[in-house]
Every structure is written in structure tokens, then in C-alpha cells.
Amino acid sequence: MPAQLISGREIAATIRSDLAERVARLKADTGRVPGLATVLVGEDPASQSYVRMKNSAAKEAGIHSEQITLPADTPEAELLGLVAGLNANPDIHGILVQLPLPGQIDEQKVLEAIDPAKDVDGFHPVNVGKLSTGATDVLAPCTPWGVIQMLLRTGNSPRGKHCVVVGRSNIVGRPMASLLLRRGEGGDATVTVAHSRTPDLGAITRQADILIVAVGRPDTVTADMVRPGAVVIDVGVNRVDAPDTDRGYRLVGDVDFDGVREVASWITPVPGGVGPMTITMLLSNTVDAFERSLER
Amino acid sequence: MPAQLISGREIAATIRSDLAERVARLKADTGRVPGLATVLVGEDPASQSYVRMKNSAAKEAGIHSEQITLPADTPEAELLGLVAGLNANPDIHGILVQLPLPGQIDEQKVLEAIDPAKDVDGFHPVNVGKLSTGATDVLAPCTPWGVIQMLLRTGNSPRGKHCVVVGRSNIVGRPMASLLLRRGEGGDATVTVAHSRTPDLGAITRQADILIVAVGRPDTVTADMVRPGAVVIDVGVNRVDAPDTDRGYRLVGDVDFDGVREVASWITPVPGGVGPMTITMLLSNTVDAFERSLER
């Protein structure tokens, strides 16, 4: 029996509809709504498209959304000034600076300039540090945070399970491990992180009750590397040539989907798996940040 | 053949002698020496003894050392004021506030008040965050950082090895995993973190090429839980009753030493293993902090 599909699209739609209700209730209670500012420097088409999607999803959930676009040659000091203004703006609860930034700007400096309480991407060192120490009152990076939601909402709680994370990026692998190690719901897993320096990847991945792959290379995980009955989450999104299609390419994950679905108990497709969760958790973080600002 | 002993005492002595030379050279070059301030609130005898040991070790290495002792009923604001003063003091490059603090003081608030550049304990969220993202120019928590040195100096580089860390504390387990995952020397390991919620601990620990145990419970790891030839690092220090001794107790680690030494290739004793490394790495961090302050 092939694996059941974990539909990120469906889960994301449910969470977004819950968020829209939460925003409406908060508006009724406080007369205010959460606000998200997205900052784009330059005209990279992929970045433009991401930022547009984020803003339109925010609006659909009833979140006030401001998109700020700056020219590609914006000096670092100007961007830092803009961030300082957004930090001080009481109508803005989430600040997202779209990466990558042009070469004249130090990305790390900009990320560190964002007020950690408004850091809805979860990349500020203070938030990374708190997450790494197991804090639960912290804004977590959107993609791994979305994976936790997918697991919980399909009855695949990580508690007491052996979770293997393949990849040690700061956007997915490392924060994924931090989330899975936290005490309480969504955490309490035994966690292994494997990566390019792992000599026999299959020996490690075959131990996983829950296998999360985030390396950015197609066919990194094949059927023989998966324990029968495992839950497989594929975070990768890769373009591969497909001359027979209109676009000339198709999107695949890091997992050999056709092979692995015959072995796994649950699996995420690509596209339509983890992808739709990332923007959803950005919205969720923005509403969380707004609620916490009310408590202060 | 029983395992070879990893003598923390000997490795610590070597590192301290290297540090004393480094300090002497820095003094000759700059006319200045690294400065360490230790802050103790209250009169807990164990804390008094730790702080005394830290100061005397600092002095032996040629590090300028200031011990500040405050009464147990010191208000939080006063301690925060003291920390602000030490942050601003150009002769102090490392600040250590001895934990635990009395109940009227919020420990986290105090740790976050220390300038991250002077945080020689490595507990500030900014340093925890940077370490967790793989940064190498960061002050790392002393105990796990000492474990890395022990591995490297016995020819047991973690690169490409499967390291299993038992325990997820913020002082040892979690930063240990971050260090082992970093790219470069002392890192590049495949890392598993197991803990109290791990259902079959032996099944996990038996996979370890390098097994690091930090849970604070004697006999957590017995011989049947160790793969023959593994390197075993025992971070635990526990008192067990020993009525036949003068003190009435003896110190043991988390590992059943007598049994495991018959299986492992290398093992740390308790005492004399990881213990002496912690203060040593505090001194090392202080000298590193001083050197970095010269670069700014």
C-alpha cells in the first residue's frame, strides 16, 4: 500500500482559515490588526514573486501588509534606517527583509537590526539562541515550524520518535533539530542531524521513524534508504529539465518520490507539500508577534 | 585490552601552560593582559569554591582577575548595574556571573545583560544563536568546548563520525551538538541527541563512534550500551554514598566506568576527566575575548 500523502496545501488552507478567524476576533477585541512589513531590495524576479505572494496571503488573512521596495543600489545605512523605523512603528508587528540582499549590504547586520520581537522569519541570533535553548515563547523559522505543524496535524507527533534530519542549513536543518528537541508538544524527539560529511547516509536514514530531508539535491533519498513505515518530509525544491513540458522544467524534491512512497507510511509531495506551509507560518508568526505585543 | 584513559588533568595542564605563554606574549606585545571578572551573589559554599578555583587558575595563567562578592539579598537592579559597569570597563574582557543566583534575581535577565563579547561562559542568547548557526568566531560554553579539545588532542576528531550526545541541557547537551555540527576542525560529525524521552537508549548509544553522556545520573550508560571500540566521554559528576571513605561519598560519572572501559577504545575517568577542562576553557575564552577586543 503506497504512503498516504501529507498535503501541505490542505493543512495550510486550514491554518490560514483559523488565522483569519483569529485576526477577526483580535480586531473585534482590540480595534487593531497585526501588521506585516516586507522589504525588498532590488528587482530579482523570484524575490519579487515571493514578496508578492507573502503580501497577498497576509491580506487574505486580514493582516495589514506594507510592501517596501528599494532600488538595488540602496546603501546599507539606508536599509538599517528603514528597519529602525519599522522597529519603532506600532502598526507593524512583523518585519521581513527578503533575502538575498545585494552585495553592498551585510545580510547578517540587517537581520540583527530587526527587533527580535518583530523577527517573523526567526533568523535573529537572539531568537535562534532562544530556540536552541528550548524556549517555546519564540518566533521560529517558518519552514521547519511548518514541518512540525504537518506532523502534528497528521497524527505523527515526534515525541519519543527517532527523527533524522538530513541537511544542516540555518534556514531548515539546524532549527528543525532545535524544534524537535524542545520539551513538549511538537518536540521530545530523539534527533539525528546528517549532512554532506556523513559517510554512509543510508545507514543513518534507515533508522528514522520520521525522516526530514533538506539538502537541495534531487534523489538524495531513495527507497532503500527508508525504513518501511517511516514518515518522510521532503523540504527540497529542485528544478529538473523536462523538455516535454511547457516550462521546460518540473519541480522535484530531494526524495525519489515514486520509489519512496512505496515504502513510507506518509510522504509529502513536491510541489504541494512543505512549500505552502512556509508562508502560512510567516502569517502565524505575525499574528503571534501581534498577540505578544498586546501582553507587553 | 581496556580503554585508554583520556586524562582531562593532563590535557588541561598543557592548555593552561600554552595559555600562560600566550598571555605573556600578548603582554609583551601590547603592555596589557586579559582581565576576568567573577561575580558571586551570596555565600553558597560550592559556588564560593568554584569562583575561588576560577580566580586562582586565571592568576596562574597571568590573567588579571577580579572577584566581586555581593550579599545574598542584593537587588536585581544593583547586579545589573554592576554588570553594566564591567561591560564598560576596558580592563575586563571576560565576565562570569556564578550561577545559581538568589530567587529575587532573574538569571536570564542578568545573562542577557552581559556584553556578548565578554560572555566567557557562552550563555548569552546571541552567542548561543551564533554557535547554533555554525559560527566559529563565537565564545562557546566551556564544558562542551573542553570536550572538543579532549577529542582533538587524543586524535579522535569527530569529523565524519557518528557522535551520540545523551542529555539535552543548555549547559552541555545542546551546545555540544552545535559544536559537533559546525563545519571544520572539531565539527563535521553526524550528531544524535538522546534524552529522557528516548524510549530505547541503548539502541541509540550503541551506534556511537563517539558517545558523550551528560545527564547527571550514575550508571546511565553500561557496557552493553557501548559499541566495542567507541570513544566514551563522561560529563556527569555525581556523589554516591561511600561509608568506608573519610568524606562518606565518592564521585562517579554517568557511565559505569569499570564495565565500559572493557569495551571502549578511549574513556574519560571521573574525577580527572572532563572536570578540569571546564575552568581551562573559561581561561581560553577570556584570552580569546581579549585578543578579539584588540582587533576592534
Image (cartoon, coloured by chain):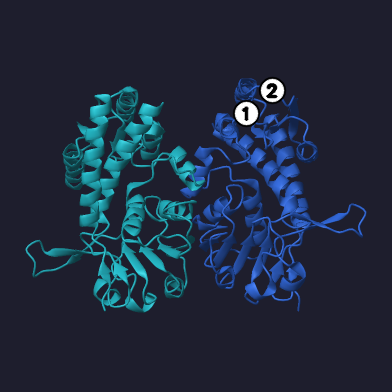
Chain colours: A cyan, B blue
Say whether residue B24 is left or right of residue A23: right
Q: Secondary structure at mark 2?
A: loop
Residue at 65% from the left image edge and 68% from the top image edge: B231
Say whether residue B74 is left or right of residue A223: right
Instruction: Tell which subunit mark 2 falls on.
Output: B
Amino acid type, label 2: Thr
Residue B147, quarter of picture:
bottom right
Residue B122 place in picture, x, y as percent:
59, 41
Q: Nearer the viewer, residue A270 or A97?
A: A270
Disc nearer the start of the sequence (1/2): 2
Residue at label 2?
A: B74
Say whether residue B168 is left or right of residue A47: right
| Cβ atoms at labels 1 and 2 below 8 Å apart | yes
Q: Work out whether residue A58 can be spotted.
A: yes
Q: Quadrant of the N terminus of chain B?
A: bottom right
Q: Which mark is residue B105?
A: 1
Residue at 46% from the left image edge and 71% from the top image edge: A204
Q: Residues within 10 Å of mark 1 (few under 14, many from 20)?
A: some
